Amino acid sequence: MLILCPVKEQNPFQSPYLCLKKKRFFMRRWIRFLILAFVGWGWGACVGGGADRSDREVDSTWVPLYETRYAERFAVLGDPTSGETVLRVLNPWQGAEGTTFDYRLVEDTTARLRTNEIRWPIRSAVCLSSSHVAFLDAVGAVGTVRGVSGRDFITNPAVHRAEVREVGYDNQLDYETLVALQPDVVFLYGLTGANSAAETLNRLGIPVIYVADYVENTPLGRAEWIIPFGLLVGRLDEAVGRFMEIEENYKAIGEQVALSTTEAKRPAVMLNAPYRDVWYLPGDRNYLVRLLDDAGGDYLGRGDDSDRSRPVSAEEALLLLVQADYWLNPGQATSLAQLRADNRRFATLPVVRRGRVYNNNARTTAQGGSDFWESGAVRPDVVLADLVRILHPELLPNHDLYYFRALE
């Protein structure tokens, strides 16, 4: 039987929800030991091998050094012959089926790196997404961050130190700053295709790694990207331990919801707000929809079996909103008055009159950056707890909202 504990202080980087029984705790520690022993064997064989690094392809003889549980976009592989370790990133953007990048970890600070080789462990990094900062922070390595994209939109205070530089956006990257920083790696992402900066950075001798957390469709799949970041900074032990805590927390809350709710008790939920009179609703396999399902909500925008958002007219969306018990993530709105001012029809909606509108902007920067899209990627257990507190407040009466807040 899972035991939920009352919480005196809400710290999302601790484990507030689950009291582990001793037997399960030590069993997990033993499993973790076995994983790390195997990975350590692979790393140990790499030491001093920089001058004779293998050029052969990563093939079926390579073995997994970490078995992913939810993530579908990465793998950690080892070569039993040479002892090399590879981080494999699969299909790192939407529509990238069949695209694979193999990044070899090279424990050699003197050898000249070849394309897709990463000096290990990394000591400096540039992050082109705020979630990359959060993953490094979660493994105690935020100090490796030397540059970021959108510094003013990142909530983590560590990036606002003087030595962390702004490097620009997308096709407007500041390559002069990047060359001056000489990071061990630039973490980047692709949207609908390869990032145009990758080729330029490789040509400048700056290694890059695609991070595909945002295209994982399950909350725990996104959070499991803590493993590659822990691997790269030489803190895999901390990464595995942290992920296991997050997984335990998430599953405990989800099981509590499943045991306590029925289909009849699942409140109807509407998501998002119109942008230029078009309302974008996430598909049924979207990350946010999965969170809503696990939190015991009934998503009103169902009907598209995909992970992509689809446009619907404002009129169609308003018809759905009339049925809503709760309205979540209404754009940039910070108050009910602002919602009414944006669209006078919102004022007549039952969900607005009852004050059941919540936005994920409880933790933001002055420029509007949201921690929900930053550390929320690493902590789906805290996001789930927020949603349960909103939709089924009786299940987590001691939880204070962290990413969400009620609009007043």
Image (spheres, helix red, strand yellow):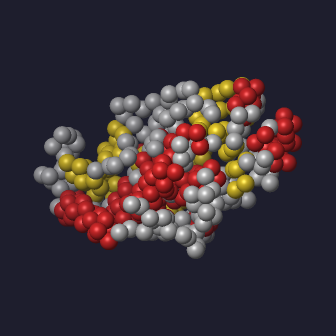
Residue at 28 percent across and 57 percent down: it is 106
Q: Residue 289 or 136: which is nearer the viewer? A: 289
Name the spot of residue 64 as percent of width and height, x first.
23, 49
Of residues 266 and 93, the one nearer the viewer is 266
Q: Position of residue 354 (x, y in %)?
A: 78, 47
> Can residue 226 be seen in this snapshot?
no
Q: Is residue 239 left or right of residue 52?
A: right
Residue depicted at x 60% and y 28%: 310
Q: Is residue 135 left or right of residue 101?
A: right
Asked which quadrant contains residue 50, the reply is bottom left
Quick check: can you spot residue 302?
yes
Which quarter shows the N terminus?
Answer: bottom left
- In percent of width and height, residue 324 lies at 70, 38
Task: Give residue 23's position: percent from left, percent from top.
Answer: 29, 68
Residue in view at x 34 percent, y 49 percent: 69
Quadrant (top left, top right, bottom left, bottom right) of the C terminus: bottom right
Horizontal side of 294 relative to 361 (left or right) equals left
* 211 relative to 400, above or below: above
Which residue: 43% across, 40% down? 92
Q: Looking at this view, is 248 or 40 the one in front?
A: 248
